[in-house]
Image (cartoon, grey):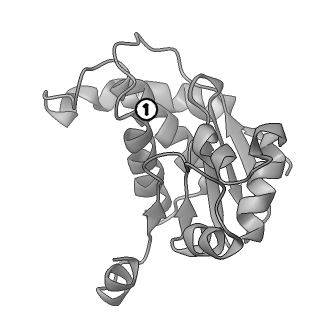
Amino acid sequence: LVRALRDAGCSMISIEPFTHATRPLTDNDLGVLCSLGDVFSPNEYEARSFWSDGHSLSVGELIERMVDNGAKIVCLRRGSKGAIVYDARTKDGYECAPLSANVVDETGCGNAFCGGFIAELSGNDGTVRDALAWGTVAASIMLEYVGVPMDPIANHRAEAQKRFAKARQSVKPFDV
């Protein structure tokens, strides 16, 4: 599928695992999984499940291992702990605290985060720092709904801009 997307001209591909590993992955499987796309974005639970010692690793060590296995940009989603992004090409890392939200349902927040992240990153001047903030905004809005918000997206623009300003201020450097 990824090869077909590349062949069709897709210039930015994000890989988001859909569940945790039921057993540690082989080096070969890890290499394929981490290097398939431009962005690799597991949640922390999924990332820890990739290795037999994953539960004892720091988040920095998790990110290093994903980079060692070929990930170009790692975006580690941590739920109520926020998210961390690391660009292996530039060696830039950032973390962002979660935004306050009226939590209704967590379902789909990872997908919303990844969508906001890749949409910003694939824009003309998108940076990993701003992409991290936009992913955080998208997840915070999704938290406030059961299912996909059905009202027009235009209804969320002003609130999204306010949340982006707050999220962008909370983005701090992160060293791996």
For the residue pair 71 and 22, the one nearer the viewer reads as 22
For the residue pair 133 and 8, the one nearer the viewer reads as 8
The residue shown at (51%, 71%) is 37
The residue shown at (55%, 63%) is 39
Say if 73 sits above or below 45 in the image.
below
Say if 8 sits above or below 41 in the image.
below
82 horizontally vs 61: left or right: left
Say if 114 sits above or below 157 in the image.
below
Q: Residue furthest top?
A: 102
155 horizontally vs 128: left or right: left
Quadrant containing the N terminus is: bottom left
Mark 1 — residue?
139
Three-letter amino acid code at the position of disc 1: Ala
Q: Callout 1: helix, strand or loop?
A: helix
The residue shown at (76%, 45%) is 54
Mark 1 neighbour class, 10 Å CA radius: few under 14, some 14 to 19, many 20 or more: many
Quadrant of the rendered structure where residue 82 is? Answer: top right
| Badge count | 1
Q: Position of residue 11 (x, y in %)?
A: 42, 78
